[in-house]
Image (cartoon, rainbow, N blue to C red):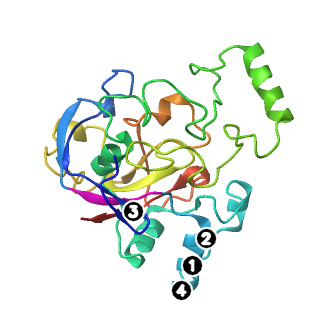
Amino acid sequence: MQTGVRNDMVLIPAGQFEMGDSHQEGSHDESPLHTVGLDAFYIDIHLVSIRQYRDFVQQTNHRPIPEWISKFSPADNHPIIGVDWHDAITYAKWAGKRLPTEAEWEYAARGGLKKKRYPWGDEIDRTSANFENPSGDSKWENTRQQRFAFWLRRQLKSDQEQEDTWSKTSPVGYFKPNGYGLYDMSGNVWEWCADWYTPDFYQHSPTKNPKGPSSGTYRVLRGGSWHDDWYNLRVAARTSDRPESTSYLQQRQGFRCAADA
């Protein structure tokens, strides 16, 4: 369903979609379901990698990459983490891009599918995203015996075989893309969006090219991470953090860029 590519970006066609929780299983901030129209825009095929971000740091003397990220994102082809919203914005401007709006992110993540739970459909799929199940309560492996069997299979597999068992981040683009050719739209790392976050924004969101509230305390994050279960991998799931955050959540926060068409 790709309609055009600019270097490492995909052109997402203009259109309308139903934004929010169509399954009525999410938090109150995912409602009401509402129709949004968007102009065409470009978005990165992949999450920004450590290699790409290191080039930016070296060329701009931006603050260095924290050493601790190697515990969670160990190689250059893994996504950059440990960045706050301001870091992401600065990188995007350096690259001649910007962060996607929350509406653009969700539209792109859906990959042309309508009212589906995930970028690939309605059922959770360990081969389509990097995620965990720390609570043990999702729709897969929900008994003690099943979780033990999963752990045992994980120990016996080689690194190449562990396509669905990464303990932290996975390389960008490791899992299959969605209908627009975009990778890691669910799982791996949460992605910073341009918007301020408020829990009631959907109640009065503009119907054309919404850009979020005019002010706030928190910025939007989308997509879920390697540490999250099925609930946060849903394309409608929303969370937020302070733009200057240095919390433990930075272990799970990265980004991709967008650009006007």
Q: Which residue is mark 4?
A: 59
- Give the camera-side residue of 7 and 57: 7
Q: Is residue 127 toward the left or the right of residue 10 in the image?
A: right
* Residue indicated by mark 2: 51
Q: What kind of secondary structure does the magenta stretch mostly adopt?
A: strand
Q: CA distance from mark 1 to mark 2?
A: 6 Å
Q: Position of residue 57 (x, y in %)?
A: 56, 79
What residue would you read off at disc 1?
55
Q: Residue furthest right?
A: 156
Asked whether residue 41 is drawn in magenta, I would say: yes
Q: In the rendered structure, which amino acid carries the disc numbered 1? A: Asp
Of badges 4 and 3, the one in the foreground is 3
Please, what is the three-letter code of the amino acid marked with disc 2? Arg
Residue 11 % position (x, y)? 31, 58
Q: Residue at x 77, y 14 (%)?
A: 145
User: Viewed as shown, does residue 230 lie left or right of 198?
Assistant: right
Quarter occupied by the C terminus = bottom left
Q: What amino acid does circle 3 point to?
A: Met
Q: From the viewer's perspective, is residue 94 above or below residue 86? A: below
Please give the residue where the numbered disc 3 appears in the rendered image: 9
Do tag 2 and tag 3 residues touch (Cβ < 8 Å)?
A: no
